[in-house]
Image (cartoon, rainbow, N blue to C red):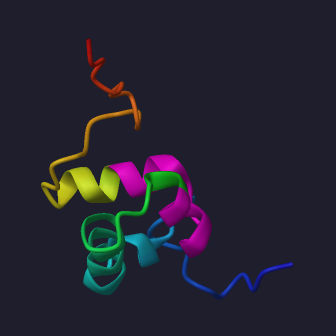
Amino acid sequence: MPDSDAAPSPTIGRPVRWRTAQVRDEMVRRYLQHGQSLRQIAGALGCSYGTVHVVLTTAKVQFRPKGGGTRRKRRTS
């Protein structure tokens, strides 16, 4: 049971750690420099896909197109 003297958390239900510049920079670095997907970043940092998406959107990161390897080889006649 928590102490009744303790001050209530200012961010109930929302961890502040995702709002730090260090974590934001780490997410941006993993996405842009290492080419990781949002799901890979979420798994590595222990947060949700949505959290990664919100953080990268707030950081004004331009997202890559969805899907991969959709280009087919050119046919030679």
Classify residue 44 as left or right of residue 36. Answer: right
Q: Position of residue 51 (x, y in %)?
A: 44, 54
Does the rendering let one see residue 46? no
Q: Within the image, what quadrant is residue 56 found in?
A: bottom left
Of residues 59 and 14, the one drawn nearer to the viewer in this rendering: 59
> Where 48 falls versus 32 (above or below)?
above
Report the residue at 31% width, 86% height from top.
22
Of residues 29 and 71, the one drawn nearer to the viewer in this rendering: 71
Give the tally of numbered discs.
0
Q: Main secondary structure of the magenta part?
A: helix
Q: Within the image, what quadrant is residue 26 found in?
A: bottom left
Q: Position of residue 57 (x, y in %)?
A: 23, 50
> Where 74 falls versus 49 (above or below)?
above
Is 42 included in the stretch rendered in magenta? yes
Is 12 included in the stretch rendered in magenta? no
- Quadrant including the N terminus: bottom right
Of residues 76 and 66, the one drawn nearer to the viewer in this rendering: 76
Report the residue at 41% width, 33% height from top.
67
Report the residue at 33% width, 28% height from top.
71
Q: Within the image, what quadrant is residue 25 found in?
A: bottom left
Q: Residue furthest top?
A: 77
- Quadrant including the C terminus: top left
Classify residue 30 as left or right of residue 15. Answer: left
Q: Residue furthest right?
A: 1
Which region of the structure is painted magenta? 40-53
Q: Position of residue 38 (x, y in %)?
A: 44, 54
Of residues 45 and 9, the one drawn nearer to the viewer in this rendering: 45
Does the rendering let one see residue 66? yes
Q: Position of residue 74 (x, y in %)?
A: 27, 23
